[in-house]
Image (cartoon, rainbow, N blue to C red):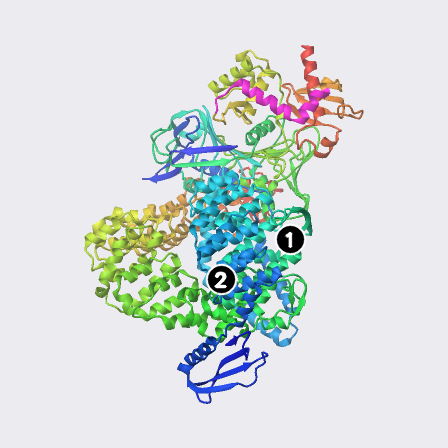
């Protein structure tokens, strides 16, 4: 502590606490000096740690009683009276931030004689936050001025002091300057009516640059949710245009006065990244009314604004550390990878980024360059550079690890968090859940969540949020839920809440955790919970009930016997698919349940939309079949069902049933099915049971089949099972012709067909005539193998039956 | 142009008790037409429908593949290559290699783990894409019930193939009732699969009506709910696609008769051989008195067709057609086909393939000049080849009413009944075809009534549209201007058995000195049978994009002279 008295001897007094020789003791050192240099001084003590502050205060009170006080405050108060306007203004601003005793009176006194520095004085009075009537009168007067800086200072002071009446007057004055359409829109909507914002934005976009600037400034001044939402998409676009720039600066200064983190970050980032071409315009000064050629949005002005932001951040860190983190976080998150510029110093132009990451220590080592500080290679900031102000808001600091776009920033935060676990212990559970997304912090964040988790009173909201999150978050949630098995076995509400997660993955994971917790537990213990779950099945769509269905279905075997038939039938009759699904699963597990619902209903269930219902229907069908209540023939109607699982189940039942229940018609029916899997089954079935049916009759039906697989079967049967006689031979002739004419028919099949034509053709002239007709149709084939094999057969038949006519002419036939 | 379909039932096939019922639901937004009968030969109908379905679903237009996955893989390889250079240290490279190997192993494990999911997703996407395609792209066939037959017409997805299945009433063993008219039928993949179940050993009822499978309503029931609706956005000029087909059919085409084995030989070679080398044409070498020789380019694989195909023309011809892959849609009917008639117009011009499925059924496949030059949006215009004598609205209305009443009637009969000249009757029929009200039956050589539109016929509007089309056609406009400016001279005019052969001299363009020489073979009705010209367009494209203005001017001059000679 440094105390000062201008007209006393000594002028300077230093009071400081130093560690004592022994642990838990401190020494008080008091030094005095006339010229500001400290030499030795007197040491008092030792004192106990707990008493140190009291001793220091007592000693300071002693000196204050002698007329000593804060030296800098005294100098600032004195500076308010110096002839230079700029010094007066700076002193006023400093007083606003430091808020020493007597500052209010000094500032009010200075205001009476102030010229252009009046704005700074009013700003300082606003920052002091003392709603003194004299201050309010002064601020209201300034708020009525036309000059932008005066009006801004006045209104922002009134806002800081909470003077609703003064603000309302200023608002009325400000609105009178607005475009009638905009004014009408504003008056038509309530201050928090956000749905009116797009219309307001659209209306603002129609304005020219200078008018738009005025409107943006006025709407930001009002600062209602509606006006802020309306100007948000417009404020950072075209902000350096002639006519707009002065209002951009005004809004930015207002944001600084309000310590509005979001808008400071947006505007400072936009200004820093903007690179307007040099522009000059003839503008009228608001101060003296003179029209003069002025450079607009010059690099110097922009650099001043950036430096002002950096200054503001430093002051926040020192004077209002609780507000520092929000502004710094918003600014750091604004930087993008695309902000890099080519060259070895990609972020040399980003002064604020460097200030936030490296200040104050590293900046001293940097070389000052135009527009910022530069480093040969921007290193990850040292951990020692984490300003103390961040510790006021650890969540904001750690949130940078997933909110910031630059890897540089994320690594910095991650390293800090890994090196000093204190950070993780200070943040809330939601932030920890978000940190799970970071591979580097996942383990630490998961461990912290585990540490905090109380299995006796689990944090349901946290578990739910983790279950709805990504895979790794769900893994942590499952780990947490595994700790509270007892709780999951007894709490209906907890189970219901977990199974009502928002995401399908979350519900599935919750079901998994619950089933794991219930493993080995007697169903009677769980019956109240299960009944509660069953009662909920009727509401909502199937997706929302999927968790409950997942929990109830595996327990169907144990649960089915504990429910009344009426309860089961009520489930299956319910309109909700989830209830039907669980009901069908339960019925499938209940002995004799097929009798309650009837065969027709079971067949209808086999065509249901949900796979679980269909599977249950197949099981019920199996029970009915075993009990002799359902005819095996009925299965044939379901064999060609549109759903693959139903078909597979039904075909399994058909395969298990003795073939004596079926016959030729059943075989033909399956062969004529539409679905390829049924056809494949039918082929195998035919081969296995061919001896039990009239193979010839089957063959005569199969020859009409259009599918290659069944045609191949027909060709296979042709050799051994074609009934003798001319009529049947004539009946299969079109099929044989088709086999030879169909592109893509396998060679082996064609060979078999030709073999048949040869064998049957040789029986007699009538058979041969049919064969020759078929062969003649394909005689001109250009497929070499076909021709080579077909022609000898034809020639052989023609030689055997010379009376037959053919397109094939046999040379030397008479001689033969 | 949007085409709306509304069905009160779904089409399908029902099998019960050894009987089958094919029920085709008709579009209730169109005129009520229905049919009830029993099929005597279900197998022929089955094969015909299957081939028509193949035509409807076919899309042979070339579309570049999207190689997104390949490009991503390539980029990853590039990155890995660059990274390899970036890391000089051997230790680092070894570490990268080890990590990459681990990553590959993990990727493979993930692929393995997700295999079931991926296959299920693929199946879902396939089903969804198929449904979406059927709902938004596949045009349901147009069915027309005539007094003697029914026909099903459709364009392929790429609009380059036109298919028409004709089922004569002799194919039915019993006809209960029918009402003539034109409508659409609900024709989905599911129906196609069910139609595959038609067998001769089951009696098969064939019902076409509004109710489809779900009800016995033959005409639309206003109280019945709508089972299925869809709206297809048709390309502009879709209607003209039908006209183009029938414009071509009414030309003097060269008919070749092929045995099914000839077409099969061509198809088998095409299925077994692929090439990227041009030309990829199907060349017909026609020599008088000899069977047709089909040459497959670029292999120059020559196929001598069966003796049935002997060419009876007077001079040898060598014509090439493209888009031969589209013939694959005939594969299904070849086993049951008795003969294939091929109608050729010339090199690069469309061709018509008629597969005769016995006497009572046939499948007509009209292929545009080449696949990209489709019937609808392609450049080939064949409507100007028809004679267009001046037809008054009264005459047109009379022809429309007569054709609507009789449903089918040849041009001479129309002319006789209405006391019109043959040229006017021909032009009137041609105008009706252009307006979507009539079609040309290639087998019978006569127009049939077939109303494609749902709006009532107004002769004045039809003529106005026709005039607008003519005004919009630059060739017709130039031809009129050349005739008016007396820039066309008939040099020679020789009568031949089927009309006239003409030669002329014409200015290439208005105000240009350069002359061209159009030559024309024209029927007695005024339809262009063949044409040539020394102008640049005809030298370059032949008739593949229609005829030039000079040929049209020569025809107009000839017709004007004929009128003056009467």
Instruction: Confirm whether the magenta stretch covers residue A422.
Output: no
Q: Nearer the viewer, residue B299 or A809?
A: B299
Picture mark count? 2
Q: Nearer the viewer, residue A509 or A764?
A: A509
Q: Which residue is mark 2?
A: A105
- State the extent of the magenta-drawn residues as a range: B455-482
Sequence-earlier tag: 2 or 1: 2
Q: Residues within 10 Å of mark 2 (few under 14, many from 20)?
A: few
Q: Residues within 10 Å of mark 1 (few under 14, many from 20)?
A: many
Q: Are marks 2 and 1 on the same chain?
A: yes
Residue B75 vs B214, above or below: the answer is: below
| Residue A26 placement (x, y as % from top left) | 45, 85
Judged from the image, the secondary structure of the residue bearing numbered disc 1 is loop
Which image quarter holds the C terminus of chain B? Answer: top right
List the single residue furthest toward the bottom: A21
Judged from the image, the secondary structure of the residue bearing numbered disc 2 is helix
Q: What chain does mark 1 sit on?
A: A
Q: Is residue A42 visible?
A: yes
Foreground tag (2 vs 1): 2
Instruction: Confirm whether the magenta stretch covers residue B462.
Output: yes
List the single residue furthest toward the right: B513
Q: Main secondary structure of the magenta part?
A: helix
Q: Which residue is mark 1?
A: A297
| Residue A240 placement (x, y as % from top left) | 62, 51
Q: Is residue B76 visible?
A: no
**Residue at mark 2 to residue at mark 1: CA–CA distance:** 37 Å
| Residue B288 placement (x, y as % from top left) | 68, 31
Please tell me in which quadrant of the rendered image residue B284 appears: top right
Instruction: Look at 58% across and 37% down and name the residue there.
Output: B160
Q: What chain does mark 2 sit on?
A: A
């Amino acid at each position: 502590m440094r105390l000062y008295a201008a007209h006393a001897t000594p002028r300077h007094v230093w009071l400081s606490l130093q560690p004592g020789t022994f642990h838990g003791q401190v020494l008080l050192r008091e030094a005095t000096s006339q010229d500001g240099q400290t030499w030795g001084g007197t040491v008092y003590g030792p004192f106990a740690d707990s008493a140190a502050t009291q001793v220091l205060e007592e000693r300071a009170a002693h000196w204050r009683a002698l007329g000593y006080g804060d030296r800098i405050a005294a100098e600032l108060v004195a500076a308010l009276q110096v002839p230079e306007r700029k010094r007066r203004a700076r002193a006023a601003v400093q007083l606003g931030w430091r808020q020493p005793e007597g500052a209010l009176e000094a500032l009010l006194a200075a205001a009476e004689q102030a010229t252009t520095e009046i704005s700074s004085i009013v700003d300082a009075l606003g920052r002091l936050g003392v709603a003194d009537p004299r201050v309010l009168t002064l601020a209201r007067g300034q708020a009525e001025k036309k000059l932008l800086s005066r009006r801004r200072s006045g209104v922002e002071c009134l806002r800081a002091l909470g003077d609703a009446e003064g603000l309302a007057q200023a608002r009325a004055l400000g609105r009178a300057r607005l475009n009638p359409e905009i004014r009408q829109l504003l008056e038509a909507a309530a201050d928090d009516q956000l749905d009116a914002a797009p219309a307001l934005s659209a209306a603002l976009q129609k304005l020219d640059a200078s008018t738009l600037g005025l409107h943006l400034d006025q709407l930001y001044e009002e600062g209602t949710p509606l006006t802020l939402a309306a100007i948000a998409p417009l404020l950072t676009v075209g902000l350096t245009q002639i006519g707009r720039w002065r209002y951009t600066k005004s809004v930015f200064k207002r944001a600084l006065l309000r310590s509005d983190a979001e808008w400071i970050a947006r505007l400072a980032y936009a200004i820093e990244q903007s690179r307007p071409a040099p522009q000059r315009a003839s503008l009228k000064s608001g101060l003296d009314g003179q029209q003069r050629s002025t450079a607009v949005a010059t690099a110097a002005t922009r650099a001043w604004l950036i430096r002002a932001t950096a200054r503001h951040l430093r002051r926040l860190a020192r004077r209002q550390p609780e507000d520092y983190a929000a502004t710094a976080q918003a600014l750091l998150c604004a930087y993008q990878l695309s902000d890099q510029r080519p060259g070895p110093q990609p972020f040399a132009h980003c002064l604020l980024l460097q200030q936030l990451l490296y200040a104050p220590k590293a900046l001293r080592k940097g070389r000052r360059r135009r527009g910022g500080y530069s480093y040969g290679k921007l290193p990850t900031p040292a951990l020692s550079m984490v300003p103390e102000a961040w510790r006021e808001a650890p969540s904001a600091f750690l949130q940078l690890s997933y909110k910031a776009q630059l890897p540089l920033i994320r690594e910095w935060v991650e390293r800090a968090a890994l090196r000093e676990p204190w950070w993780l212990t200070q943040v809330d559970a939601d932030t920890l859940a978000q940190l799970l997304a970071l591979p580097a912090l996942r383990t630490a964040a998961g461990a912290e969540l585990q540490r905090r988790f109380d299995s006796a009173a689990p944090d349901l909201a946290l578990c739910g949020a983790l279950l709805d999150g990504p895979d790794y978050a769900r893994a942590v949630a499952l780990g947490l839920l595994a700790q509270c098995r007892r709780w999951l076995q007894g709490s209906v509400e907890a189970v219901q809440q977990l199974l009502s997660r928002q995401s399908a993955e979350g519900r599935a994971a919750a079901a998994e955790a619950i089933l794991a917790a219930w493993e080995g537990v007697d169903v009677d213990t769980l019956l109240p919970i299960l009944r509660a779950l069953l009662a909920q099945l009727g509401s909502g769509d199937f997706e929302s009930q999927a968790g409950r269905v997942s929990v109830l279905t595996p327990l169907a075997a144990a649960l089915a016997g504990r429910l009344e038939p009426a309860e089961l039938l009520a489930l299956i009759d319910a309109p909700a698919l989830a209830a039907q699904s669980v009901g069908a699963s339960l019925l499938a597990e209940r002995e004799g349940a097929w009798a309650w619902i009837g065969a027709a209903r079971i067949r209808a269930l086999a065509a249901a939309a949900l796979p679980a219902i269909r599977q249950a229907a197949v099981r019920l069908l199996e029970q009915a079949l075993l009990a002799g209540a359902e005819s095996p023939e009925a299965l044939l109607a379901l064999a060609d069902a549109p759903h693959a699982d139903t078909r597979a189940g039904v075909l399994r039942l058909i395969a298990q049933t003795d073939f004596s229940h079926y016959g030729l018609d059943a075989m033909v029916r399956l062969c004529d099915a539409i679905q390829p899997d049924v056809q494949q089954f039918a082929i195998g079935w035919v081969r296995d049971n061919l001896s039990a049916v009239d193979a010839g009759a089957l063959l005569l039906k199969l020859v009409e089949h259009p599918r290659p697989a069944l045609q191949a079967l027909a060709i296979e049967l042709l050799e051994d099972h074609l009934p003798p006689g001319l009529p049947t031979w004539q009946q299969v002739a079109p099929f044989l012709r088709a086999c030879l004419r169909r592109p893509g028919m396998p060679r082996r099949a064609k060979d078999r067909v030709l073999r048949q034509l040869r064998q049957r053709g040789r029986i007699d002239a009538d058979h041969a005539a049919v064969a020759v007709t078929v062969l003649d149709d394909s005689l001109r084939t250009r497929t070499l193998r076909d021709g080579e094999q077909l022609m000898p057969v034809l020639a052989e038949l023609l030689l055997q039956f010379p009376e037959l006519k053919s397109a094939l002419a046999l040379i030397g036939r008479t001689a033969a | 142009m949007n085409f709306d379909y509304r069905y009160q039932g779904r089409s399908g096939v029902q099998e019960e008790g050894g009987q089958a019922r094919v029920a085709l639901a008709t579009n209730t937004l169109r005129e009520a037409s229905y049919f009830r009968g029993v099929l005597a030969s279900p197998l022929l109908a089955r094969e015909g429908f299957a081939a028509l379905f193949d035509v409807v679903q076919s899309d042979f237009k070339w579309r570049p593949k999207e190689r997104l996955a390949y490009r991503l893989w390539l980029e990853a390889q590039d990155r890995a290559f660059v990274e390899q250079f970036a890391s000089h240290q051997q230790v680092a490279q070894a570490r990268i290699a080890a990590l990459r190997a681990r990553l590959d192993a993990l990727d493979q494990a993930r692929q393995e783990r997700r295999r079931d999911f991926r296959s299920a997703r693929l199946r879902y996407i396939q089903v969804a894409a198929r449904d979406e395609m059927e709902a938004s792209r596949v045009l349901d066939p147009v069915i027309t019930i005539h007094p003697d037959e029914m026909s099903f017409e459709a364009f392929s997805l790429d609009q380059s193939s036109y298919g028409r299945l004709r089922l004569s009433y002799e194919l039915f063993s019993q006809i209960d009732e029918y009402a003539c008219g034109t409508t659409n039928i609900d024709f989905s993949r599911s129906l196609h699969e069910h139609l595959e179940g038609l067998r001769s050993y089951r009696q098969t009822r064939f019902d076409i009506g509004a109710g489809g499978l779900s009800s016995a309503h033959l005409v639309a029931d206003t109280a019945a709910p709508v089972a299925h609706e869809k709206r297809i956005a048709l390309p502009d000029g879709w209607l003209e696609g039908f006209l183009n087909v029938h414009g071509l059919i009414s030309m003097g085409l060269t008919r070749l008769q092929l045995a099914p084995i000839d077409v099969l030989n061509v198809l088998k070679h095409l299925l077994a051989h692929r090439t990227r080398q041009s030309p990829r044409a199907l060349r017909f070498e026609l020599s008088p008195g000899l069977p047709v020789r089909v040459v497959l380019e670029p292999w120059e694989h020559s196929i001598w067709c069966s003796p049935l195909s002997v060419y009876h023309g007077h001079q040898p011809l060598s014509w090439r057609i493209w888009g031969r892959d589209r013939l694959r849609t005939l594969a299904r009917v070849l086993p049951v086909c008795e003969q294939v008639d091929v109608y050729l117009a010339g090199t690069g011009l469309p061709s018509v393939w008629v597969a005769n499925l016995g006497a009572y059924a046939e499948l007509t496949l009209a292929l545009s000049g080449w696949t990209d030059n489709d019937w609808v949006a392609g450049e080939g215009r064949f409507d100007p080849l028809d004679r267009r004598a001046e037809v008054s609205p009264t005459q047109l209305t009379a022809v429309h009413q007569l054709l609507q009443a009789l449903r089918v009637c040849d041009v001479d009969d129309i002319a006789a009944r209405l006391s019109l000249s043959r040229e006017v009757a021909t032009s009137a029929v041609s105008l009706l075809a252009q307006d979507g009200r009539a079609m040309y039956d290639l087998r019978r050589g006569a127009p049939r009534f077939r109303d494609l539109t749902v709006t009532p016929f107004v002769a004045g509007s039809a003529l106005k549209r026709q005039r607008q089309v003519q005004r919009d056609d630059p060739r017709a406009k130039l031809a009129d201007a050349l005739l008016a400016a007396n820039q066309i001279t008939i040099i020679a005019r020789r009568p031949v058995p089927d009309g006239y052969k003409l030669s002329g001299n014409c200015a290439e363009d208005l105000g240009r000195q350069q002359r061209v020489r159009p030559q024309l073979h024209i029927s007695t009705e005024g339809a262009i049978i063949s044409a040539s010209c020394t102008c640049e367009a005809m030298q370059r494209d032949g008739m593949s994009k229609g005829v030039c203005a000079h040929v049209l001017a020569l025809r107009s001059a000839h017709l004007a002279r004929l009128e003056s000679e009467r």
